[in-house]
Image (cartoon, grey):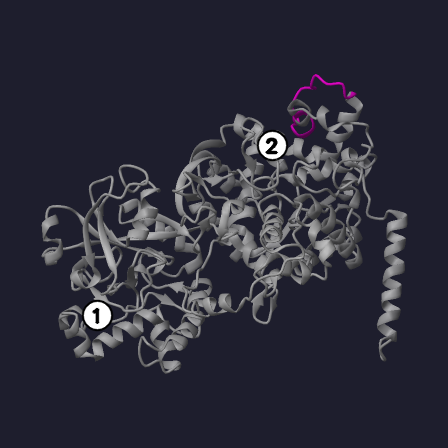
């Protein structure tokens, strides 16, 4: 025993004794029955997004959870009836993908596996330092958190071993259902050790292994479809042209966990006189098309970049326009409705980048009426379109390359670039970034003493410094968006260009994905079921809900407003993973951001159906079986005016369930991280107003969105 821990040990002993007393006396177990006489004191219902069960909980959870814990403790002291339930999320792809990956590793390398040397992999990765920093949609934030859990190993077996598991134990995780047995009890154990004021009788896991929750989610989706909130149509997905079907994680040789990455495709029109190589296309609208992750910076375009020794093609789109880009990008576009026939690229011209350098262009939003195509030697063919927009005010790479061309006449002469194509073009102040000013790229390049575009390591550091800070803290200086934060208007600026026909949505895989048949996958528009977020009537109701929502700070409110401004359809169906099947089309699974929007209502009745059994496989306290929970039964419980259903369940039992819901709902406080505002928390508002459109008193009352706990300057 270490010296000096006696006081801490004494406090821990008191903590354990008190927690045992709480559990013994069932202090936090609370029912609506018999509490009508306490209504004058009020009730308080708080929830926290149920964590995903592909690992242990971490400090980030504790940080957010503390807000729930303190709020419940305070409201209990005020004499209110307080409910804090806690569920555990298992829906989605990651658990199944990890289990299947373990199976493949055992098939390929034996059990326990003997893996090949990883040095080759490390060498390959070392060359990827220059890869673009992606400011991602925070809906995908789970991936970065998952990556943090994985440690250094590229093999799933190594990841599991890093959790302290033996080889014999790891084998069990090759079955997805084992994850559902293993991690949820550990989460409950950790949360109890933390001392949460939770009513554990109401806890459950998701997916169809829990028949009661499965029934609840089916009811929700049947209701949404009945109310015309769910549609069927084309959605973006990773697709194998060779196999002729979507390529899910279990179908991939490489690229597990990789999804579609959205770009804004900027259309830069080629102006007369055309370069000689394009003269045969006179009369056609020709565009150099660049894929950008930062549409908000297009106000600062000074030129466009092409790689002189790269092969490009011109292909005819369905509208008759000619797009110039790489063959790889055109292949992706052909599966996204850009060409007349899916998968066919009608090539009208093959050319090298150097053959169209100096082309005069008209660029959307640029303050310069005419810009020019200039040479950049570091453009990669495996990402984007091979055409790159240049914003030297906010991109260190662009600033360094433009400065090289200005300073080096010999470089201009080598590629036939005239002085007037380069020298008059100066960086345009478009975004004010705290600490870096209105020209952050020149500022950081000077600070790091970057001499040329060949200073790759320093440029990577410069990019790291300015990109994320510019996005999260930058304030617009131009146009109708002047004075607004970049992260609030990014989607609005994208929409502005889309509406004018100056840009398009373009998708490609975040990283290379190879199918098991060794085919390089693309992003394709495939048929899927989706929630029609953004539909005007629905959006109006969600905005009304937001008007009355307590957000505790203006930043959260602005983020909600911005999200409701741009949020559009969300695909709610998948063919791979764990979850509940769509009740009317059972080839599809309901994905994880869609079965997690109104489960707070399920908390109100879970203890009477499941009795604290996480899987819902024990004896129901009311003797109700899952198969008896029809849509009409759920309607009666959750909708005030719904008639009593035709059912074997006695009315007094259903009335008890109804009483619980009516007493506890709405949710008085939902606590989460601010990264869930653009996805989960906005879906939370949308689904509540859809399900209880006529009962506004059931709409969410307050959302507390906190920032991120940092560990070594990285989000936990």
Q: Residues within 10 Å of mark 2 (few under 14, many from 20)?
A: many
Q: Give the residue displayed 68% in from the left and 35% down from the top.
A: 213
Report x, y in % for residue 150.
61, 61
Q: Nearer the viewer, residue 483 or 155?
A: 155
Return the disc, 1 or 2, that comes first in the chain's sequence.
2
141 left or right of 21 in image: left
The residue carrying mark 2 is: 220
Q: Is residue 45 visible?
A: no
Please give the range of residues in magenta: 635-650
Membership of 639 in magenta stretch: yes
Q: Quadrant of the C terminus?
A: bottom right
Q: Quadrant of the N terminus?
A: bottom right
The residue carrying mark 1 is: 425
Report x, y in % for residue 146.
59, 57
Q: Nearer the viewer, residue 632 or 432?
A: 632
Q: Residues within 10 Å of mark 1 (few under 14, many from 20)?
A: some
Report x, y in % for residue 423.
18, 73
Q: Is residue 456 above or below residue 611?
A: below
415 left or right of 229 in image: left
Secondary structure mainly formed by the magenta segment: loop
Residue 499 lies in what quarter of the image?
A: top left
Residue 133 lies in what quarter of the image?
A: bottom left
Q: CA distance from mark 1 to mark 2?
A: 57 Å
Kindly check if marks 1 and 2 are in contact, taking CB atoms under 8 A apart as contact.
Answer: no
133 left or right of 267 in image: right
Report x, y in % for residue 428.
28, 68
Membership of 431 in magenta stretch: no
Q: Give the residue displayed 31% in from the left and 59% down from the top.
A: 298
């Amino acid at each position: 025993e270490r010296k000096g821990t006696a006081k801490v040990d004494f406090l821990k002993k008191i903590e354990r004794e008190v927690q045992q007393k709480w559990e013994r006396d069932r202090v936090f177990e609370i029912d609506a029955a018999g509490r009508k006489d306490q209504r004058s004191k009020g009730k308080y219902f708080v929830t926290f997004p149920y964590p995903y069960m592909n690992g242990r909980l971490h400090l980030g959870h504790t940080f957010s959870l503390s807000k729930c814990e303190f709020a419940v403790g305070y409201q209990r002291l005020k004499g209110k009836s307080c409910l804090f339930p806690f569920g555990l999320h298992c829906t989605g792809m990651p658990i199944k993908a990890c289990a299947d990956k373990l199976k493949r590793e055992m098939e390929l390398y034996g059990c326990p596996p003997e893996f090949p040397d990883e040095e080759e992999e490390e060498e390959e990765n070392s060359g990827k330092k220059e890869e673009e920093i992606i400011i991602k949609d925070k809906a995908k934030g789970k991936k970065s958190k998952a990556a943090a859990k994985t440690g250094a190993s590229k093999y799933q077996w190594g990841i599991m071993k890093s959790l302290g598991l033996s080889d014999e134990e790891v084998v069990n995780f090759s079955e997805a259902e084992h994850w559902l047995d293993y991690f949820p009890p550990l989460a409950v154990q950790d949360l109890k050790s933390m001392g949460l004021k939770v009513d554990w009788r109401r806890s459950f896991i998701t997916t169809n292994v829990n028949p009661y929750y499965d029934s609840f989610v089916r009811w929700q989706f049947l209701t949404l479809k009945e109310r015309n909130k769910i549609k069927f149509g084309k959605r973006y997905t990773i697709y194998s042209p060779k196999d002729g079907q979507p390529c899910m994680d279990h179908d991939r040789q490489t690229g597990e966990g990789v999804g579609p990455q959205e770009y804004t495709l900027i259309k830069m029109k080629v102006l007369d006189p055309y370069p000689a190589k394009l003269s045969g296309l006179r009369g056609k609208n020709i565009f150099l098309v660049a894929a950008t992750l930062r549409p908000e910076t297009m106000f600062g375009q000074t030129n466009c970049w092409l790689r002189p020794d790269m092969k490009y093609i011109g292909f005819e789109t369905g509208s008759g326009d000619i797009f110039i880009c790489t063959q790889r990008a055109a292949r992706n576009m052909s599966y996204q409705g850009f060409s007349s026939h899916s998968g066919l690229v009608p090539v009208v011209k093959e050319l090298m980048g150097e053959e169209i350098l100096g082309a005069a262009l008209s660029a959307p939003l640029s303050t310069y009426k005419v810009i020019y195509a200039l040479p950049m030697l570091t453009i990669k063919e495996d990402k984007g379109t091979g055409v790159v927009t240049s914003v030297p005010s906010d991109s260190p790479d662009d600033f360094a390359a433009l400065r090289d061309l200005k300073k080096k006449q010999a470089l201009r002469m080598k590629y036939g670039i005239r002085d007037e194509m380069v020298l008059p073009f100066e960086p345009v102040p478009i975004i004010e970034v705290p600490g870096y000013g209105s020209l952050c790229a020149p500022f950081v390049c000077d600070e790091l003493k970057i001499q040329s575009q060949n200073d790759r390591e320093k440029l990577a550091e410069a990019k790291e410094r300015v990109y994320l800070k510019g996005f999260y803290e930058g304030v617009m200086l131009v146009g109708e968006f002047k004075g607004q934060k970049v992260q609030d208007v990014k989607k609005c600026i994208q929409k502005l260009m889309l509406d004018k026909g100056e840009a398009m949505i373009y998708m490609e895989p975040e990283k290379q994905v190879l199918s098991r048949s060794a085919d390089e996958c693309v992003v394709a528009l495939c048929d899927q079921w989706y929630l029609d977020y953004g539909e005007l009537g629905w959006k109006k109701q969600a905005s009304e809900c937001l008007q009355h929502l307590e957000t505790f700070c203006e930043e959260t409110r602005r983020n909600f407003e911005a999200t409701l401004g741009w949020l559009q359809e969300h695909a709610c169906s998948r063919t791979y993973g764990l979850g509940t099947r769509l009740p009317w089309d059972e080839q599809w699974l309901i994905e994880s951001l869609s079965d997690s929007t109104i489960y707070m209502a399920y908390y109100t009745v879970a203890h009477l159906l499941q009795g604290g059994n996480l899987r819902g496989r024990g004896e129901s306290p009311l003797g109700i079986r899952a198969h008896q929970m029809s849509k009409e039964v759920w309607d009666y419980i959750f909708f005030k005016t719904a008639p009593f259903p035709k059912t074997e369940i006695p009315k007094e039992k259903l009335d008890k369930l109804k009483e619980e819901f009516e007493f506890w709902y709405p949710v008085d406080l939902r606590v989460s991280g601010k990264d869930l505002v653009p996805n989960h928390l906005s879906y939370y508002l949308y689904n509540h107003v859809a399900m209880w459109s006529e009962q506004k008193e059931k709409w969410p009352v307050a959302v507390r969105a906190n920032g991120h706990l940092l560990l070594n300057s990285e989000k936990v």
